[in-house]
Amino acid sequence: MELLKKDMKKVLWWGMLGVMLLGTFSHFAYDFFGKIKCLGYIFPVNESTWEHMKLAFYPMLLFHFLLCSLVERKYKSGEFASLAGVLAATWLIPVFFYTYRGCLGFGKSFIDISIFYVSVALAFCLMAHILKAGKEKTYDTLTWILYGVIVFHIIAFIYFSYHPGKLQIFVDPTAM
């Protein structure tokens, strides 16, 4: 199925909504399904910032594969744009979290929750910009580099789910 240009805005809006809903569901999925260990590789197992990065990463990755199947011939930059979006949404979460907490010196739940939604929205803005600006560009080398980074993230999420490091990103901020 080839996506028409006029439909791209709708796809991105629905995709953003879907990622936000799936990410919200993901926050509760590990406990809901009885803390099955293999599900902890995909869903957050605790309240650490690292685990909350999964809320954006896996739904965005799922959207990446959907988007690529829709736009592969129409937008040559589609693959690169969606991979950049996956990584942007994932890493904006700790950037915003530690920036605001560092500036304020304390945290608020409504801000913590909002960070996920803002990160996803900004990632979709980035994807839209790349799709619009680079419609005829392929970004082959950069795309393969981003795939490597994505694979590294999957491995890291799997490992650190049950072997968290001692860095602040692995610590549950509610336990401090």
Image (spheres, rainbow, N blue to C red):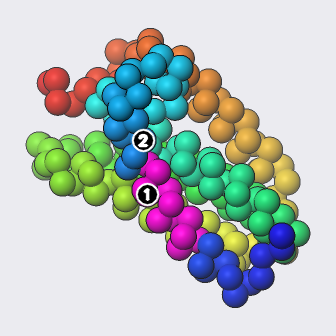
Residue 169 vs 20, above or below: the answer is above
Name which residue lies at 70% across and 45% down: 146
Q: Is residue 29 found left or right of 68 in the rendered image?
A: left
On the rendered structure, is 78 left or right of 115? right
Indicate which disc residue 95 carries.
none
Residues shaded magenta: 12-23
The numbered dot on residue 26 is 2
Tell me what residue is drawn at x 17 percent, y 48 percent: 109
Query: What is the quadrant of residue 70 in the picture?
Result: bottom right
**Quadrant, the C terminus:** top left
Name the disc covering residue 20, or none: 1
* Whether residue 36 is situated above or below residue 15 in the rendered picture: above
The amino acid type, in three-letter code, at marker 2 is Ser
32, above or below 38, in the image:
below
Element at label 1? helix
Q: In the picture provided, is 24 more to the left or to the right than 112?
A: right
Residue 93 in picture, x, y percent from top left: 39, 47
In front of the other: 32 or 172: 32
Magenta-colored stretch includes residue 76: no
Crowding near pointer 2: few (<14 within 10 Å), some, many (20+)?
many
Above/below status of 170 relative to 19: above
The secondary element bearing badge 2 is classed as helix
Magenta span: chief secondary structure: helix
Label 1 sits on what residue type? Met
User: Which residue is depicted at the point 56% across and 65% down?
Assistant: 15
The image position of residue 29, as x and y in percent, is 40, 35
Quadrant housing residue 48: top left
Residue 17 can be seen, yes or no: yes
Spatial separation of the CA atoms under disc 2 and disc 1: 10 Å
